[in-house]
Image (tube, rainbow, N blue to C red):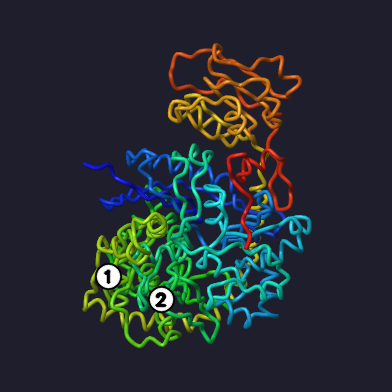
Amino acid sequence: MMNPSYLMALDAGGSGGHCLLVDVAGGAFTRVFRPWTHPAAPETAGLGTDLDLDAIWTTLAEGARAALERAGATPDQVLAVAATSMRHTTVVLDGDGNALLATPNRDARAAGEAFQLASEHGSLLYARTGQWPSPLATAARLRWLARANPDAWARATTVITLSDWIAYRLCGESGTEPSQAGATLLFDVAHRDWAPDLAEELGIPRRLLPRLRPAGTHLGTVTRAAAELFGLRAGTPVAVGGADTQCAMLGAGAVTPGQVGAIGGTTVPVQLVLDRPVVDPDERLWTGCHVLADRWVLESNAGAMGEALDWFARILHPDAAHPVAHFLAEAGLSEPGAAGILSTLGTGVMNARKLRLPTGTITLSHLSTAHDPHRRSHLERAVVDGMAYAVRANLEQLRDVAATQSSPATFSLGGGMSRSAVFAQVLSDVLGVPVEVGATPESTALGAALCAGVAVGVFADLAEGAQRFRGQARAVLPDKQRARAYDEFYGGWQQLRAAGADAETLASQLILPSALKAMSASAARSRPALRPRILVTADMDDDGLAALRALGDAEYASFRTAMRLLTGPSLVEALAGVQVFITEVDVVDADAIRQLPELRVVAACRATRSTSTSRHAPRSGFRSSTPGTQRRRRRRPHRRVPADAGPPAAHGVGVPASAGDRRRRHGSDGSGVRRPARS
């Protein structure tokens, strides 16, 4: 039997990172998820959120190593890797690859700049880019950076997205692709190219716009440093990926004009695939590029369903191991119409010109379920029904703008909500068409893996790759009787939503001060106590690692697992930006220490292996500890990190990091990573 070959996808989302390994021949998936959070940005009145690039990089690497181990795959079996990420992320780099600004799609610090763009250039920008100005747009954030931090603005050389940055860190080559660039307000959607005249009009230098590369093309190869961290083979091809929703549509098989689908994640975008760009004359929708070179998408959004569902499920099922799964399963015990309860929680019908704080209502009379022992399931069903109604309302909006008269033959469903058989069935009944549930809930990561496969010739093109895995999808068929009932219930829900529109607007205004107060408090709490970066190459048990991670940002790379001995240049490279080093067999000498100005503590788990001595400490400024040999093979640290361990510099916008820390965070570490390419 031949050894399997794999395609690897790295998916950086709002709540964490996925690594997906796709068995090319067998079609099996190995998925590892690792959570993360995005810290609130200080001095942004609660509106700003930063990307913790360090945490994202190390978390994705940990997930990749875990996926390889779980699949029993060797580095040589990985044919290629590609990255995808949420849209509306912004990473501004200087000429050495250091991040001057890094924001997720939740960041709204540029609200003032967005409102100014909308008032002065709104319709012009929409006609050219297919996007109405919003605080999420890169153009608005760049104008904010120019105003808030002129020094950083002067040093900026390129702006990319998070998925572009991950690819850059993997191989040292930078660029972006149309599905991501389309959300920047600087991209001509019809011509699938940058709009330098718009950039000039907005005061954004042309030099910041990176080279455009099509999804599924070869970008570069994994560097030696990245290969060691991710468990890959140096030289593994890195492919151009794409934006999360468009990659998810690819992974769900929605690539033909007229196909439509929804990706059920934190929010639920609904996209219609087109063979030409169509813009909404009322400027409510988004027009963007698909990852396929000759396809576009028209997009609406059904609201922050995943986020609201998680919030409510944790209230109703606080002790459940998986509250959302429990919530959805219990909703299945109810009936269409939810015993008269109606919900708009977590729903919306997109209007890009009137973005506001998401609000929702649950409308009921206790009398309709007064003696029903299953009243909680009715409440849950009302939420699920309302979310399915919102998908239908957004689909109808898309069809109206695209002048599509006939209903779609099928509706594609991907993302985390596709795991629920209850939601898929309710959605099919509400839409009255078969719902095609993708081969894996990780449809975004699958789409990125298909991009990797095209780059190395596994598939002739992206459409062929999508078709290969569409055969693993399952169809959920509507029940005719329930579909007729839902037609009536949907009409009532739409009437209730229209009648309550003014109340929802008022509610948003009344709640906004409390929301801003909560976000400001979160920003204050998230201002980190300075924490050292810790590298552990000694064998260590979980309790020891947990203790270290309570003190600092600890990276664990056991010498036994990595099968490597750090010495000389490899040691200096690995310890760039590290303040605390816990070792067992590595060779730490005075020459290496002199090249590591940030290193403060070296702890050796065996006295016989300690190669650093206290006579170097006064000159080098670090502390040496040799706890001695232990009986157990897996060790806990014997020396607590001292309070004066010299934590890394802060990385707020425009706050220069130390040279060593810049090398560590952004790849200019002597590992072959080149400066970002500019168009």
Residue for badge 1: 335
Determine which quarter of the picture holds residue 157. Answer: bottom right
- On the image, the x and y values in percent for residue 443 come to 37, 60
For image coordinates 45% across by 27% down, the residue present is 563
Would you place residue 35 above or below residue 144 in this image?
Answer: above
* Residue farthest toward the right in the current orientation of the protein: 151
Label 2 environment density (alpha carbons within 10 Å; few <14, some 14–19, many ≥20): many
- On the image, the x and y values in percent for residue 281 come to 53, 87
In the rendered structure, the answer to whether residue 227 lies left or right of residue 129 reads left
Question: Is residue 373 in view?
Answer: no
Would you place residue 286 above or below residue 1 in this image?
Answer: below
Label 1 environment density (alpha carbons within 10 Å; few <14, some 14–19, many ≥20): some
Front-lying residue, 656 or 307: 656
- On the image, the x and y values in percent for residue 166 come to 53, 51
Q: Secondary structure at mark 1?
A: loop
Residue for badge 2: 272
Front-lying residue, 503 or 591: 591
Closer to the eye: label 1 or 2: 2
